[in-house]
Image: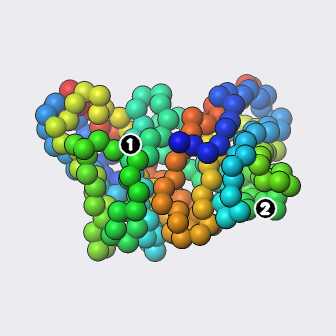
Amino acid sequence: DSGVTQTPKHLITATGQRVTLRCSPRSGDLSVYWYQQSLDQGLQFLIHYYNGEERAKGNILERFSAQQFPDLHSELNLSSLELGDSALYFCASSVETGANEAFFGQGTRLTVV
Amino acid sequence: DAKTTQPNSMESNEEEPVHLPCNHSTISGTDYIHWYRQLPSQGPEYVIHGLTSNVNNRMASLAIAEDRKSSTLILHRATLRDAAVYYCILRDGGYNNNDMRFGAGTRLTVKP
């Protein structure tokens, strides 16, 4: 158990809909990272939050947004869903500096039909 | 873009050592070298990390070249459960660690 919790584990929804994925970081970790992994593809970095502030954006579509709340949990909102958004979405948490390891959740599998 | 280069795939025999290479020629002085692995249908998991000196833990060893432009993850006795994609990434040890980008990694196949 990495200590990072992602909910839900599975999500099936229709095209055009909106969903929210939730990530609770490890206790004490202020950084949360979000990733998208399509079938047999690599981990695509989406966005990084640190203590409630957005720190970096990667290949995140405008239809996607994220936020980190005062209790440090984070949510990734995906709207106007398309078939191509079907993927595994992972979050990771870490102490801020790279001198420390990062820990990943088990992911949310999103299927858009 | 990922700052590391790894072979796409490697094979190993069960119970033999495995050396997974990683090149990071543009590494900066404050970059830590991290290794993660992703087993099928699971989230990535931390393996090991280091700055300059070689590191050992219960999972693996990390050998870092003297000029730090390359490193090698060593699994001392591969098991079938070690079959995974292994990622080598750099993370700034300072307070500018604003993203954590992964490349394609090395897919390790372990043969019985």
Give percent across and percent down for residue B69: 77, 49
Name which residue type carries label 2: Thr
Q: Is residue B26 left or right of A5 when viewed as pictured?
A: right
Which residue matches tag 2?
A: B52
Q: Is residue B65 left or right of A30 when viewed as pictured?
A: right
A82 or A10: nearer the viewer? A82
B108 or B33: nearer the viewer? B33
Q: Quadrant of residue B108?
A: top right
Q: Is residue B108 visible?
A: no
**Label 1 secondary element:** loop
Give percent across and percent down for residue A83: 25, 27
Name which residue type carries label 1: Asn
Q: Crowdedness of circle 1 by 10 Å Cα count: few (<14), some, many (20+)?
A: few
Q: Crowdedness of circle 2 by 10 Å Cα count: few (<14), some, many (20+)?
A: some
Name the disc covering residue A59, or none: 1
The alpha-carbon separation of the residues under discs 2 and 1 comes to: 31 Å
Chain ID for label 1? Answer: A
Quadrant of the snapshot with the C terminus of chain A: top left
Q: Quadrant of residue A69?
A: bottom left
Identity of the residue drawn at 54% across and 59% down = A102
